[in-house]
Image (cartoon, rainbow, N blue to C red):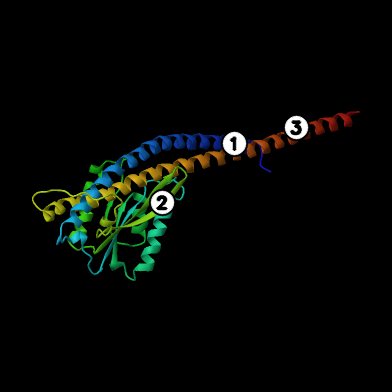
Amino acid sequence: MASLRDIKARISSTKKMSHITKAMEMTSAAKWNRGVMNAKSFVPYMEKIQEVTASIATGASGVIHPMLTHRPVKKTGYIVITSDRGLAGAFNSNVIRRVHQTIQSRHQSKDEFAIIAIGRVGRDFFVKQGYNVVLDIVGLHDQPNFQDIKDITSSTVGMFSDATFDELYIYYSHYVSAISQEVTDKKLLPLTDLSTTSHKLTSYEFEPNAEEILEVLLPQYAESLIYGALLDSKASEHAARMTAMRNATDNANELIRNYSLSYNRARQAAITQEITEIVGGAAALE
């Protein structure tokens, strides 16, 4: 059995750890509230740009654009969104596992795909695996704005337009609730779901013509899809870290209770032993 000093030291260190995890939980809760608000406030813009793009693309006959055209797949790009830090439960590992399993099932060679990594955890994993990470961005703010990722989004869309990639997928953790996040994968390019929008399409009058408007609008739409996924992922990250830190605090408190019980038992046993020795000594003197 551990000594009283050892048990007391464990109680003290565990209490300090519980204070840290509680503080991290409160910090993540504040970031989570803002993250959810950012993700939800971006939805109306996403819906509107999709509706406008779909209306123009489907309403104009004979429109041909590389981002709307399927071509033989020689190389696939995967955008993977993870966090820069851990301590978020299975948030990062779930996304990485899904991407890794997909790559293993779809591809026979590392030359058939490449990774665009948003987040240090995902980047480090795929670099360690020897995969081709062509673009990466780390150190993003907890509440990112579009300018923070504009370079990587425009470069990613440009790599599809210049045929570096023939198709592009995005993997991230979709926010469902504070205790539930789902790994989501979407085919980003070529754009194939424009006509499946649930909103009624509007007939627009535009100048100069559909081709020139789509030349500007389609890249913006694809970039907004990446940014929307990032906001969604950030909300999931803060929720996952908040839940993980709450669980860690609860576990620490349970350890403290167990250690305290062990300490009291050991202390009681020591007192009983001392009393027994005193009684025994007194009896020997009689």
Pointer 1: what residue? 11
- Viewer can see residue 25: yes
What whole-number distance in Å separates the C-alpha atoms at marks 1 and 3? 20 Å
Q: Quadrant of the N terminus?
A: top right
**Based on the displayed image, in which of its 4 quarters is residue 236 positioned?**
top left
Looking at the image, tell me whether mark 3 or mark 2 is earlier in sequence order: 2
What whole-number distance in Å separates the C-alpha atoms at marks 3 and 2? 50 Å
Looking at the image, which is closer to me, 207 or 40? 207
Q: Amino acid at mark 1?
A: Ile
Task: Please rate how many residues cluster around mark 3, counting C-alpha atoms within 10 Å: few if below 14, some from 14 to 19, many from 20.
Answer: few
Q: Amino acid at mark 2?
A: Asn
The residue lying at 38 percent from left, 43 percent from top is 235
Where does residue 100 sit, x and y in percent of width and height? 39, 61
Mark carried by residue 271: 3
- Viewer can see residue 152: no
Mark carried by residue 92: 2
Looking at the image, which is closer to me, 229 or 83? 229
Q: Amino acid at mark 3?
A: Ile
Looking at the image, tell me whether mark 1 or mark 3 is earlier in sequence order: 1
Residue 223, above or below 2: below
For residue 160, side relative to residue 2 (left or right): left
Residue 232, above or below 127: above
Q: Secondary structure at mark 1?
A: helix
